[in-house]
Image: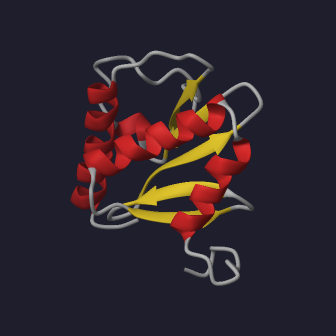
Amino acid sequence: MSMSEPKDGKSPSSMIDERIAELGDWRGEMLSRLRALIKQAVPEVIEEWKWRGVPVWYHDGMICTGETYKAAVKMTFAKGAALDDPSGLFNASLDGNTRRAIDFHEGAKFDEEALKALVRAAVTLNASRGRG
């Protein structure tokens, strides 16, 4: 994809591996855990590395990003406003028209099955719209 940065021959997945390792703290552990849940929910997910170092997951269009900040790991769903969130996972970017996000803080407990359901719902929405 043209929006991806030069990878010096590295795959997006290996760049994400490096980011997790270089964080070296709870944020790396959280990003790794979220990534594993995404892959469990959508085994054929495509990983990309964009915007100077943001992991992005795709299936029939963008599903979500995994941004790391000092106090949070933020999972932003590209079309989150159109998704049902019965477990109330979304806790950030609630006022936008399209995106919704979940901020995970150190030691955060959350419903992993609900998160996987949200990821699958995003994939279903992407497929139903037939575009990215």
Q: Tell me, yes or no, if residue 98 can be seen here.
A: no
Judge left or right: residue 55 versus residue 121: right
Q: Tell me, yes or no, if residue 37 can be seen here.
A: yes
Colour mode?
A: secondary structure
Q: Decide: is 35 above or below 44.
A: above
- Name the residue rendered at 64%, 43% in the picture: 67
List x then y, in percent, for residue 103: 58, 26
* Along the line of sight, the residue nearer the viewer: 58 or 71: 71
Judge left or right: residue 78 versus residue 129: right
List x then y, in percent, for residue 31: 55, 40
Could you tell me which quadrant the N terminus lies in? bottom right
List x then y, in percent, for residue 42: 27, 53
Could you tell me which quadrant the C terminus lies in? bottom left
- Name the residue rendered at 22%, 57% in the picture: 128
Q: Decide: is 14 above or below 75.
A: below
List x then y, in percent, for residue 98: 49, 41
Place residue 25 in its image quadrant. Answer: top right
Judge left or right: residue 62 versus residue 83: right
